Image (tube, rainbow, N blue to C red):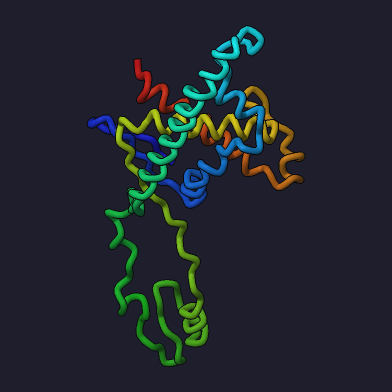
Amino acid sequence: MHLQKLPDGSIRLSRLNPWDVQTFRSLPALADYTAAPEAERRLLPAPAIESDLTPEMAMDWVEYVVPELRESFAESFTTVMADLETLSLDPGPEAEDAGDGVADDAEEQGEPSPSGQKSTAKGNVSQQAVEEMQEVEEEPPMPHFVLTIPGDHAEAWFRAMNQARIVLSIRYGIDSERVPELGRLLEAGQLEYWFQYELFVSLQGWLVEAVLNPE
């Protein structure tokens, strides 16, 4: 993945592989804290120690502030998912050389030799070998994608990834200060969550440094 801040303030993510794209598309699910009460408490904290709150203050917080926070979270994910709809295939730096490496038909196939073989750029091989080589289907290269995010959407992306990061940390015991028990995560089929967590941490750091607080 390549990260770039463009002159107009927008953000360009290029060389995104399918896993990167799927991780971004999974952000709403990864950030779902309905089954993680501790994550909900961190994302929707009380304004003070609960014992210091009057009943009226607690009611006002639940009635007015919490819905606004939830709405803010939802808006962030709406923005992120809308941006992902603008994904396009990334031609990559090799696109300019797309015509290179294509051999001329005559040069590639060569002329039949008296022994019934063809002389090719790869040497003399039998007709049967040539036919077998032609039948082999090469595995297509992994596609890559490019995404341009408006500069004023950077904060929404940061909030969405931050929410997902907090939920992943609490649900699966992943901590940015130490490497988790990878064997435990692997056995539980949860190792991918660690990679997703690390991706979000890295992108959040870059957004803060390059976009949200460049100075």
Looking at the rendered image, the quarter that the C terminus falls into is top left
Q: Name the residue: 46% across, 29% down.
A: 159
75 is higher (above) or lower (below) than 104: above
Say which of 104 and 36 sits in front: 36
Say which of 162 and 100 sits in front: 162
Q: Name the residue: 33% across, 53% down.
A: 91
x, y (%) of residue 207? 41, 27
Looking at the rendered image, the quarter that the N terminus falls into is top left
Tell me: 40 left or right of 27. right
Q: Name the residue: 39% across, 46% down.
A: 84
x, y (%) of residue 199? 53, 36
77 is higher (above) or lower (below) than 38: below
Say which of 157 and 33 sits in front: 33
70 is higher (above) or lower (below) than 45: below
x, y (%) of residue 213? 37, 18
Tell me: 174 left or right of 28. right
Q: Quadrant of residue 188?
A: top right
198 is higher (above) or lower (below) than 145: above
x, y (%) of residue 81? 41, 44
- Residue lying at the far left of the rendered structure: 8
Q: Name the residue: 32% across, 67% down.
A: 102
- Residue lying at the far front of the rendered structure: 56
Say which of 7 and 168 sits in front: 168
Q: How many numbered badges does the structure rendering display?
A: 0
